[in-house]
Image (cartoon, rainbow, N blue to C red):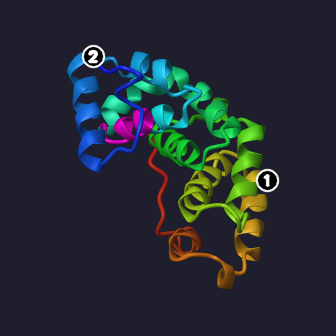
Amino acid sequence: MHITRERLKGAYSEGEALAIYKEVKDTNDFIHFAQKFMHDKDYQVARNALWGLTKATDKELSQLQPILHELIDLSLSTENSSVRRLSLNVILRLEIKEEDLRTDFFDFCLEHMVNLEELPGIQSLCIKLAYHMASFYPELMGEFMRILNSMDMVYYKPAVISIRRNILSGKYKIKRKV
């Protein structure tokens, strides 16, 4: 793999993220690439690596399934909102099974989906992920729906309003992997 830490530093454009993805695709080693760069102390490196990964197809991203919990740990621990948003994006595209349910992650998603100081993209991803996790247990779904119903939409951005409305109306469907 020719992608270096130095190359991932700095501001990136959409085109550069696509170029990174294409190089990773050529090596077909998504897991090694992710593990090598997603925990970098330089948030730009981690951000750019994760951004490149979001360009992958769901089938390609499925290579990251063995590190699902590592990605969850990253989203829980990072101080950087871009790294958090991108890692949540990757997690959402992986298969989350009942046995993968982590209460710390579920609680994190519930907290961040209503946090008015959180970015709308992170709020929306957290709503989707919490909904997915809650779908395994009626008691969690009840808690999730109570929180979702109690959100005063006056304070939220359109992305959050839209996903909330789609879940409440039954238009948002969980994609279960087969």
Q: Is residue 19 left or right of residue 125?
A: left
Residue at the disc numbered 2? 2
Residue 26, quarter of picture: top left
Type of amino acid under label 1 = Glu
Residue at 49% x, 32% y is 46
The numbered disc on residue 120 is: none
**Residue 93 location (% of width, % of height):** 44, 42
Question: Residue 55: within the magenta?
Answer: yes
- Residue 142: in sight, yes or no? yes
Give neighbour class at mark 2: few <14, some 14-19, many 20+ (Cα, 10 Å): few
Label 2's element?
loop
Q: Is residue 117 above or below residue 155?
A: above
Residue at coordinates 62% horizontally, 27% vertically from top-left?
Answer: 69
Give the number of marks.
2
* Mark 1 residue element: helix
Asked whether 39 or 67 is in front, the reply is: 39
Q: Could you tell which of marks 2 and 1 lies nearer the N-terminus?
A: 2
